[in-house]
Image: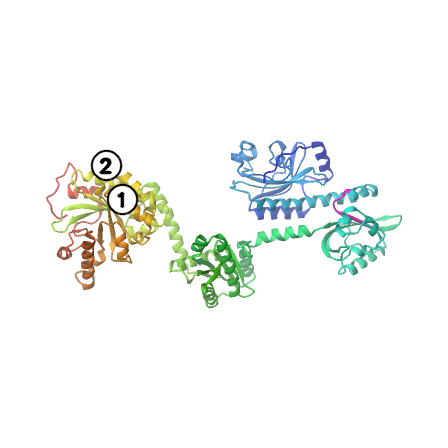
Amino acid sequence: MRAAPMPIDEDARLARLAEYQLGDQSDDPTFDHLVQLTSRLFGVPVAFVSFMERERQVFYCKIGFDLAETDRRYSFCAHTISRDALFFVLDAALDPRFHDNPQVTDWPFVRFYAGVPLRSPSGHAFGTLCILDHRPRNQFSERDAQNLTDLGKIATDLFEKRRLNLAREASQSRFQGIAASSPDGIICCDQEGHITVWNEAATQLFGYASSEAIGQSVDIIVSRRAAGAHNMGMMRVVDGGAPRLIGKTIELPARHKDGTEFPIELSLSMWCEDGRTAFGSIVRDIRERRANEEQLFSLAHHDPLTALPNRMVLSNRISEATQGGQAASILVIDLDGFKEVNDALGHSAGDQLLQMTAKRLLDCVRPTDTVARIGGDEFAVVLVATPDLTMASRIAALILTTIAVPFAIDDEVINLGASIGIALGSTDNEAAEDLLSRADLALYRAKGDGRNCFRQFTPDLKQTALNKRESREDLHRATENGEFVIFYQPQVHLSDGTLIGAEALLRWQHPKHGLLSPATFISNLENSRYAAEVGAWVMSQACLQAAEWRRYAPDFRIGVNLFGVQSRSSALAKRVLDALSAAHLPTSALELEITENIILVHDKAQIAMFSALRKAGVGIAFDDYGTGYASLSQLKAFPLTRLKIDQSFVRGMCDSREDAAIIRAVIDLSTSFGLAIIAEGVETEEQRRRLLDKGCSEAQGYLFSRPIPAADFTALYGLSDDMTLPDKKSA
């Protein structure tokens, strides 16, 4: 909603501004409440009401900064008053009109601005209601624009009330002139309560023409509910009693000519004419304002989709309970499978599902408890005066059962589950966010334990979260500082121990904890945003090293493990071939090692990508085969070249008939599928001999060498000009 500039008659505008008799600072607390509400509603640090003089902008009421005024030349609001509606700037630093403005480059560092002009009844803009932020925004929606416009109307109403109150203090003749042009109803009556002045706006409000109203009792517009109190108050003043409402603005019900009642705002005044008491009132229909206020209140406190309280209300309810000496338990609920439904059936179905879920949750709790939607498909429940796990667990179990009942939407039957985290509160004035944070940690545990369950917060969860955060920070530093190193474990012929190649294995040279094995960090790394970067680095370095060693061992091959995130990238094939090309290494010298979590995805695009690599000559080995759930059909579909027998079977083969049988079956399976085979974890001569007897010809393990740095590997196998390549002997 970008309003077009409009011509300004500056002298006329300033004359209208003078009618409001504004000082440099508001003396009306209503304006303070208005800017505070505006700031909260739009989530901005700064909101203000200002008026524009000829040379300066004066901040009449404000929140978020201490400026009293500013030069009009640099004022954003100077643009606003020249528009017929709302004006906004999403990023002042990128706007050629404002990028070098001192208010952008210096305090208050304006990046985002939005404002509406405040206009007098004559249409002249005398001021503005504005918001601004030190951060830019991507958008200012139509709904945001309407809300700010509605708040501007409220501010305009407040100023107009001030103008009319000032006018009331003027002479009666001037009052009559103002009354005739006022958009508000102006009604005067004598001390008997008979109407003496009735303007056109009053006719619009109450339906009575001036000829019908003047001379009639003012009771014709008074609500029947308020008639008695009104008459008693008038008679008390006439009899010399102290007026209670004169000079004040009140809200009360009024009655239209057709008998309907509606709320009005009424400002009363009293004076004497020829020794007789007279009363005057300025009347305004506040139905629209009430509706706007109710809408704004609802927007600030409720989720618009489900009508449940929002996170702010949830936090307040928790605080109220704990500060009131009551204990409160928190349940945080996340829907399992909601994203899949949303993607498959669309957002409309997803919205209906959230609304139905909200109703089911309300059915699971007491009227004194609070159910809130705190974002996406996440809800929370505050159980007041329920500090024990037994009650909280009973409610959680009921919620799981209730959510599990199939949903019916547009002839579709939808099955969902839920994961729930529970945090038990106390009466020690706990911060609401701390309690919610603990419930969130318990929720993550429930998801990690398989979902469709509930878990209670325990102190170890917080420590685990702290450890993960520390690990993420460490991984960031390790990636930035190059703390990862590659060790190499030789792969040899079982018959004579001659070198075939090596598997590249990642290690972490931690500055505090020394050399770390993959078991201590690989899971966190694989689930971090650094996995793809580190994986690409390992690929590049291993290929370069293999190319160097192939100068002395021409058939040398290198095995490189892939992270799951690498296998899911459509650019994997290109990156692998680029790494080979950069190292001048033939494709046959590289073997990618993949684990079951990659095989089980069974994505057609992924299979096609690995098939392209296989066709180019790159080997693909299935690591740790036999330890998981990969089926024969998946084995058949994937373009594998080698199976790796897991070390757990090799370790037990001499003592366990079952492990020996598994190894024999894997070897037979590889032969049937035309795949090569290699055994991991060979540590003893007996294991080597038995593997040979079963038909396995290649292996790696401590019997031949631990994983070692490249320099030690070079020395061990004489892969340099300074050393002699040993005769085909076991390392």
Q: Which residues are magenta?
A: 181-187
> Residue 607 appears at what percent x and percent y?
30, 49
Q: Crowdedness of circle 1 by 10 Å Cα count: few (<14), some, many (20+)?
A: many
What's the residue at 15%, 37% (across, down)? Answer: 722
**Left or right, 9 with reference to 307:** right
Q: Quadrant of residue 155?
A: top right
Q: Closest to the observer: 434 or 305?
A: 305
In which quadrant of the rendered image does the N terminus lie?
A: top right
- Is 94 located above or below residue 398 in the figure? above
Q: Horizontal placement of 205 versus 81: left or right? A: right
Q: Does the stretch in magenta take in 183?
A: yes
Decide if residue 331 is in sight here.
no
* Residue type, mark 1 in image: Leu
Secondary element under disc 2, as helix, strand or loop, is loop
Q: Position of residue 666 (x, y in %)?
A: 20, 57
- Given the image, on which type of amino acid does mark 2 rest? His
